[in-house]
Amino acid sequence: VVATQLLNRNRPVVIALFTSDALGLNGNNLMKLMVTKNIYFVPFYQDDPIAYPNRLVSNFKRVPDTLRYALRGKQIQPLIMARDRDD
C-alpha cells in the first residue's frame, strides 16, 4: 500500500532484494520492475551460484547511496555486482 501511494505521488521506491527465485520463474517480474518509473534497486549479486543458483541478494552496505541516488531520480550503478568476499 505504501509503495503504491509513493508511486502515485511520483516519489521513489527503493527495493533491496533477498530472494531465492529471482533468476527462476520470478525473473520476468523482476525485469518488469527494473524498467518501472520511480522504482530503484539496491545493487545486488548472485549469492551462491552452486548451492542457490537462482538467489539474488542486495549489498545492504549500498542502501544509503542508493537512497541518495533515488531521491535525484537516478539508479545507482553498477546495479548487478560481483560478490565481495567480505559480504
Image (cartoon, rainbow, N blue to C red):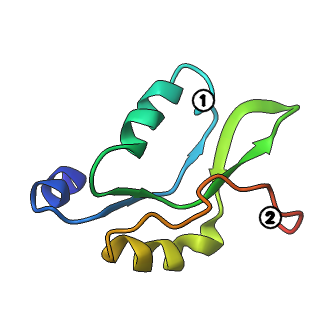
Which x, y percent locates residue 60? 61, 67
Residue for point 13% across, 56% down: 5
Question: In the rendering, which numbered label is found on residue 21?
Answer: 1
Q: Secondary structure at mark 2?
A: loop
| The quadrant where residue 72 appears | bottom left
Residue for point 63% across, 29% down: 23
Q: Quadrant of the C terminus?
A: bottom right
Which x, y percent locates residue 18? 59, 48
Amino acid on which disc 1 is placed: Asp
Which x, y percent locates residue 16? 51, 56
Task: Please rate how many residues cluster around mark 1, counting C-alpha atoms within 10 Å: few if below 14, some from 14 to 19, many from 20.
Answer: some
How many numbered dots are placed on residues in this image? 2
| The quadrant where residue 59 appears | bottom right
Most foreground residue, 77 or 28: 77
Using the image, determine if residue 75 lies above or below residue 56.
below
Amino acid on which disc 2 is placed: Asp
Using the image, determine if residue 32 lies above or below residue 56.
above
Question: In the rendering, which numbered label is found on residue 77?
Answer: none
Residue for point 88% across, 32% down: 50
Identity of the residue furthest to the left in this view: 9
Using the image, determine if residue 2 lies above or below residue 63.
above
Q: Is residue 71 left or right of residue 19?
A: left
What is the spatial separation of the Cα atoms under label 1 and label 2, in whole angstroms? 20 Å
Question: In the rendering, which numbered label is found on residue 87?
Answer: 2
Q: Secondary structure at mark 1?
A: loop
